[in-house]
Each structure stands twice: as C-alpha cells, then as structure tokens.
Amino acid sequence: MSKKTIAVLTSGGDAPGMNAAIRAVVRTGISFGMRVLGVHRGYNGLLNKDVQEMDLRSVSDIIHHGGTMLFTARSPEFNTPEGVKKAADHCRELGIDGVVVIGGDGSFRGARDLTGAGIPCIGVPGTIDNDIASSEYTIGFDTAMNTAVEMVDRLRDTTESHDRCSVVEVMGRRCGDLALQTGIAVGATSILVPEVPFDFQRDIIERMRFTQKTGKKHFIIVVAEGVGGVADLAKEIEKQTGIETRATVLGHVQRGGSPSLRDRVAGSAMGYYATKLLKDGKSNRVVVMQGGKITDFDITEALNMKRTFDKDLYDIAHVVSI
C-alpha cells in the first residue's frame, strides 16, 4: 500500500504563526507515516507544480519567524473553474491525497472548490484581522495586536511630549477587533470600528473636550482601516479643537515580527488537528477555535456564518478610556 501524501500551503495575507502551523502539519503528517509536500506561493504553487517534499528538518527553526516559509500569493487564475480543475489535475499528477490550506475566507473558498474537484482539503484560519466568523480566534491576531500596541506606545511618547492628538489607523478592513482591543490596551480616547457607526462630534470632539476639563492634554484616537479617512479626521480635529493633530497609518508593519506565544501554540494545535482530520479521511472542513477549544466545521457552513462584534467590550472601552 502506497504512503498517503498530503500537501500544505499558505494563501492570502501572511500572518505571524503560519510557520508554526506549517511545522505542525509537516511533523504530524510524518508521525502518521505520511509523505508531506510544501506548496510554494499558495494556489499558484499547485497551478505551477511548485512544490517541495518536506522532512522533519525542513521545518526546523521556523516557529519563531513571522511570515510564511512557503510564501504566499493571490491567484486570479485559481479563482476560475478552469484554474481549479488545473490545480486538481496537478494534485493527482503529484499524488496528493489531501491539502491543508492556511489562510482566510478567500482561501477557504478555494479549499471548498478544490474539494469539489476531488481533492480533500482542510482549512486553518490564519489572518491578523480575526475576521473568520466560525472561529473566535485566528492565527496572527495576538501578534498583530501586540505590534500595534508597541507602535502606539511609541507614538504616545511624542504625543504626550507635545500635547498632541494622534489619530492612528490599524488594520481591519471589515473587522474592528484589532482596533478595539488595541484601543483599550493603549487607553485611546476614541475607537472607531466598521461595525459601529460613529458621530464625529459626540464620539470624538465631545469626549476630547470632556477629558480636557479633567486635565488631559494629549489624546490617542484608534481607527480601523475599514473606517479610514485618518488624514481628514486629523485635520478636522485640529480645526475644531485647536490641538495639534497628526495622522499615522501603521500599515503592514502589523503583519510582521516574531509570533507571540499564543500564535505559536494556536498554530501548532490547529496544524496538528487539520492533519489528523486528513488522516481520518475527513475533507471540506475548517479547523476553528470555539470556547477556547479546537474543533471543526464544514467549510460551506463556516463560510455562511455571520461574525458577531463584541459590543460589550466596545461599551467597556467607552467607559474606561475617558
């Protein structure tokens, strides 16, 4: 009987902790007696047969590195029926019996399509935005938050020295979790997220004026990328308050850096779980965290779930950051 062959790839935006997941897939697969292939640059690697056979030492000394050792890319060609068929045909030619896909919702849609074309796939949530509805936690979120907090703390030093207001944009196009938790951690006067409509006067200007009366002289406003417009917000704040105001976009610095303990552990646990699902003959599943425990859902079911924003935590931020 031939040895079962699985593959692992990372797709979409990179996230700290992806390497921990890759490492877990490779070593778990080998421990199960499987042959493991690493696919370079996401689904493009399947289209181009850009793969390498992995052994235990292939993933040595990667757990503490950010990014992904397999690289990542977006693949317009794979997003077509012809592309999916080509990728599936290449999997069969390479003897691949299943694929672990580490990424976000777009990557999971690709995994569902590839499963539909006859190649069993398991998804693992890796995205700094924490925007996977089916999972309360995604690999990379904790590291990105800690990076954002460190950067805002540095900004605070100069903001405080000059009695300024800093309007800081953090990542999160559709999800405000990164902005919310970073905002609480840095004591932001206002936190703007896509999930909650805001009133400029009430939620920014009036809060700043109230805290001025209590002796506060410098301010941090944290804004999610999906809200945007930080340069215009900064200009309007300065115009209405007379406080010198600067806008800062943290950008892709939030994606990089050595993954935190939480992301190393979550990546390892999820990678192990995904590999075991393939060993047990499961497919079209996504590994998720629910109630602090690792479990799994059908990918289609997971993609249809609606993400809930933690309004209670948002209300807490409103009270304590004043």
Image (cartoon, rainbow, N blue to C red):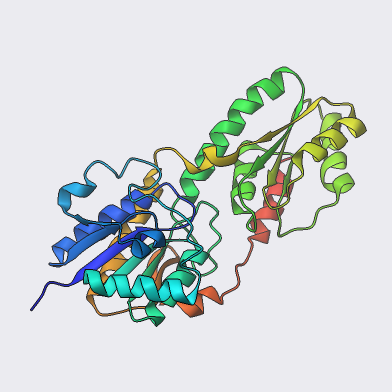
> Image check: 4 left or right of 134?
left
Q: Residue at x 42, y 73 (%)?
A: 84
* Front residue (pair 214, 2): 2
Q: Quadrant of residue 73?
A: bottom left
* Front residue (pair 47, 108): 47
Where's residue 54, x and y in %?
20, 55
Where's residue 264, x and y in %?
35, 49
**188 over 137 or under it: above or below:** above
> Image check: 253 left or right of 243?
left
Q: Residue at x 37, y 45 (%)?
A: 261
Where's residue 69, x and y in %?
33, 47
Where's residue 293, x and y in %?
39, 65
Q: Residue at x 82, y 25 (%)?
A: 244
Q: Residue at x 65, y 27 (%)?
A: 156
> Image check: 129 left or right of 183?
left
What is the residue that sits farthest to the left in this orientation?
1
Quarter of the image containing the C terminus? top right
